[in-house]
Image (tube, rainbow, N blue to C red):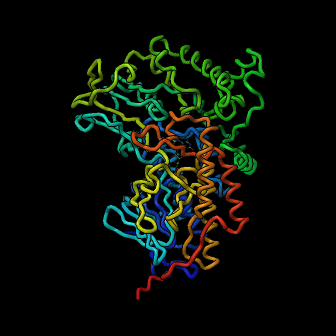
Amino acid sequence: MTSPEPATDRSPSRAVADVDVLVIGAGITGIYQLYRAREAGFTTLLLEAGDGVGGTWYWNRYPGARFDSESYTYAYLFSKELFDEWEWHEHFAAQPEIERYLNHVVDRFGLRRQMRFGAHVTSAVFDEATGTWTVATGDGNEVRTRFLVAATGILSVPYYPDIAGREDFRGQSFHTGRWPTTPVDFTDRRVAVVGTASSGVQVVPAVVDEVASLTVFQRTANWCTPLNNAPITDEEQRRLRADFESMREFLDASPSGFLHPVHDRGTFDDSEDQRLAFYEAMWNSPGFSKLTSNYTDLTVDHAANARWCEFVADKIRSIVVDPGTADLLVPTDHRYAEKRPPFVTGYYEAFNDPKVELVDLRATPIVRVTGTGIETTDAEREFDIIVWATGFDFGTGALNRLGIRGRDGIALEDHWADGPTTFLGIQTAGFPNLFFPGGPHAAAGNNPRYNGDQVDFITQTLVHLRDLGYDVIEADDAAEERWTTMVDSGAATSPFGEISYFFGTNIPGKPRRYLLNSGGRPKLSKEMTRVVDTDYAAFRMTRAPDPAGARP
Ligand SMILES: Cc1cc2nc3c(=O)[nH]c(=O)nc-3n(C[C@H](O)[C@H](O)[C@H](O)COP(=O)(O)OP(=O)(O)OC[C@H]3O[C@@H](n4cnc5c(N)ncnc54)[C@H](O)[C@@H]3O)c2cc1C
């Protein structure tokens, strides 16, 4: 295995641990945590199940995979030099460019030698005597660490619906979230795409021109609106660099972490003509603006939401030529933004191609996958390739599968049997020295902005602990209860409804519990500041009984 750098004088781990800080996950959160912990003088190691850097952007390399966040607002903003030297080519970069960027960051800051790939963590067990974690990987290795940071992602465990015969299919079959590194040839193939949420709607237009036939299996129609991607011009590139500080300030103040201005009017403050003109501007606006810059009452007033939905439905019907297909593509079971809205380029247009068929799984559910295709209640269709765009076990999926055992051997998945309880979305009582930035309860919106806040806070906290000479830190139960109650009660005011995977609804048997923090980034930042101002009263800091592991 890769040897971690030797302990420094400032290392709190002393003899017992191999490293001070072990990070799991080489996504945008884990890379940043590795960087920050190392900069703070801790010895570090990162374990990643995949064979490369990127997390989401390593695994999701399906055709059409790209940002819904503007590239430069998603990117790291901690280094102006890094920002200046990397030139994003599109406002919403595609997966290859994002993967290249994250690899560039890793190499630029010399992080690769502290990363171990193909290292799937299978268990992490806390030892109370030494205040350390023993982390085991599938390849039989073990690492002892003082602090464990599980940056394992919210959308990193792919979900397959329980459909009989899935393994029997003799053609090629892929989940979008586990796409192979070798390109898949769609030329003249009969292709099925199962699922029409954010990933499925990206795949469809990306492959439609190559395939012999494309059958889209839809359970729930989603409110898709245009991404409105474009290349970044030289002038825009110059402006981005010149405006770096003001952009960062804007993003820091934005609840959603986007660069979109908030509108100042409600839907019915405008006349019908004004409203239609505004909707048209929204339709032509970039990405998430349709949610973040829309009328202020979009997600709180059902009549306002219905009016926007009517506009979007008219757009769908104006694009899709066949009225029956258009009808099926208009959602009927949820309001706009009640589920995470997807953004598209050419999705609806694809259905005008005669080789594209839409199958309504509500009317004709899948019975089984056969050796040669998919059988629904009304037909059996043959395919060469099946693409499963069927989502993820959101929020807790990866953490609950890590084999985490805290105090008294308690399993994290048991502790969270009714859904997660956390303080700041970074710690849970009973699991000392374990942190999980980028997990459930953090905030909502442009992920790296608030995941980065969590990493900064964790690093600052570890430095504080080290300065005081403590070995063990654990969220206080009362603080955790307060934060979790805030998260749970925020479900009522969240735009997202129980139909959304943000409540775990897409996974059979998963507790229905809200997994995001409705207070968003401002609430998270405020609470983190409060923790520091109150001298970390929300955490218990102690010395391990036998921190150096010297057995009697
Ligand atoms: C297709 C897609 C598009 C997205 N687009 C956007 C977007 O535009 N904007 C946005 O804000 N968010 C987007 N997201 C959400 C995205 O997941 C986050 O933005 C971001 O990638 C999270 O980074 P992370 O480092 O926290 O987690 P991840 O990128 O998920 O990385 C976690 C890593 O942990 C590793 N890991 C997990 N378990 C183990 C284990 N047991 N052992 C070892 N390693 C393990 C995984 O292999 C993975 O590499 C998108 C998600 C998907 C799936």
Residue 194 percent coordinates (x, y): 38, 30
Q: Residue at x 69, y 37 (%)?
A: 260
Q: Is residue 172 above or below residue 11?
A: above
Q: Residue at x 48, y 20 (%)?
A: 329
Q: Is residue 233 left or right of residue 191?
A: right
Residue 6 percent coordinates (x, y): 48, 78
Q: Residue at x 38, y 63 (%)?
A: 123
Q: Nearer the viewer, residue 84 or 526?
A: 526
Q: Is residue 442 above or below residue 353?
A: below
Do we see residue 28 in this rendering?
no
Task: Point out the image quarter for the N terminus.
Answer: bottom left
Do we see residue 233 in this rendering?
yes
Number of numbered discs on residues = 0
Q: Is residue 333 left or right of residue 190?
A: right
Q: Is residue 98 above or below residue 413?
A: above
Residue 522 percent coordinates (x, y): 70, 49
Residue 21 percent coordinates (x, y): 51, 69
Q: Nearer the viewer, residue 424 or 175?
A: 424
Task: Point out the image quarter for the C terminus.
Answer: bottom left
Q: Which image quadrant for residue 532?
A: bottom right
Q: Which image quadrant for residue 288?
A: top right
